Amino acid sequence: MRRRANNGGVVITAKQVAYCLKHLQDGTALRRSALTRLPVVTRLAAERYRGSYWGQASALRDVLLETCRRLEAGMEADPGVRRVVTFLKLYTSETSVSQIARQLAVNRTTVYRFIMPDAFALLAEELARHSVPQGATKGS
């Protein structure tokens, strides 16, 4: 799902989120992401990491992890949503997909085909929703 919001002209996609989560501990890879241009990321980089070469990457990592925590805190009773949010929690803590599959009591194929894409799409949607400056409206 593509989402365009008034967030610095950045389109937030599940593919971008997947890339960033895959490289969560790699500052160089995170700096290459268009998501570093999100206003929420640039503002956090300026406030918390002023003058740091890795500021944008660190801020993006912080925003992604905080968004995952927000999803976990608002987890619904729906087992599908719980499974997706649990996947995000484990994936961002560097748990292997095999271990995640065991903890979710599914096979790895199910994780790769269904849970992982749903998780990245949910995180992209949540990131788009919370990265819009107050007073701005979303477009399509």
Image: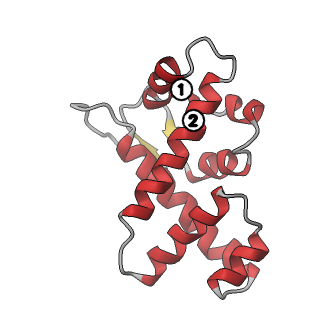
Circle 2 is placed at which residue position?
A: 60
114 and 56: which is toward the camera = 56
Residue 107 in percent (x, y) is at: 73, 85
Does the rendering let one see residue 134?
A: yes
**Residue at coordinates 65% horizontally, 88% vertically from top-left?**
105
Q: Quadrant of residue 56?
A: top right
Does the rendering let one see residue 12?
A: no
Residue 90 in percent (x, y) is at: 63, 65
Packing grade of label 2 (10 A; few <14, some 14-19, many >=20) is many
Circle 1 is placed at which residue position?
A: 37
- Give above or below for 30 relative to 89: above
**Residue at coordinates 47% horizontally, 26% vertically from top-left?**
44
29 and 7: which is toward the camera = 29
- Helix, strand or loop at mark 2: helix
Residue 113 in percent (x, y) is at: 67, 74
- Give above or below for 133 relative to 129: above
Packing grade of label 1 (10 A; few <14, some 14-19, many >=20) is some
Name the outermost residue toward the left: 135
- Give above or below for 29 relative to 129: above
Specify the amino acid type for callout 1.
Arg
Specify the amino acid type for callout 2.
Leu
**Residue at coordinates 36% horizontally, 32% vertically from top-left?**
6
User: In the picture, which quadrant includes the C terminus?
Assistant: top left
Residue 131 in percent (x, y) is at: 39, 38
Instruction: State how far apart marks 1 and 2 are (Cα).
Output: 9 Å
